[in-house]
């Protein structure tokens, strides 16, 4: 995985290095 910038780096650390897609899937599971 290559870094695309500081913004992405901070986001990845915030969510435990999960991709945005994984996050959205997790949220959907929690909603159900």
Image (cartoon, rainbow, N blue to C red):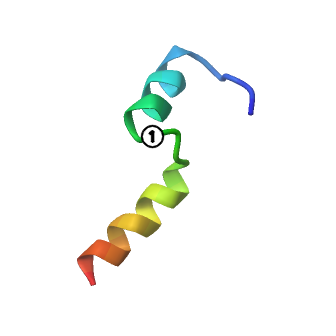
Q: Position of residue 28 (x, y in %)?
A: 35, 73
Secondary structure under badge 1?
loop
Q: Position of residue 7 (x, y in %)?
A: 47, 21
Quadrant for residue 3, please give it: top right
Residue at 52% across, 47% down: 18
Q: Residue furthest left?
A: 31
Residue at 52% across, 15% down: 6
In the rendered view, would you say 26 is above or below 23?
A: below
Q: Quadrant of the N terminus?
A: top right
Residue at 45% across, 30% down: 13
In the rendered view, would you say 15 is above or below 4?
A: below
Instruction: Answer with left or right where residue 14 lies relative to residue 30.
Output: right
In the rendered view, would you say 24 is above or below 19?
A: below
Q: Residue furthest right?
A: 1
Quadrant for residue 26, please give it: bottom left
- Residue that numbered label 1 is attached to: 16
Q: Residues within 10 Å of mark 1 (few under 14, many from 20)?
A: few
């Amino acid at each position: 995985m290559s870094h695309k910038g500081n913004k992405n780096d901070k986001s990845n650390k915030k969510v435990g290095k999960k991709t945005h897609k994984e996050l959205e899937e997790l949220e959907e599971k929690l909603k159900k």
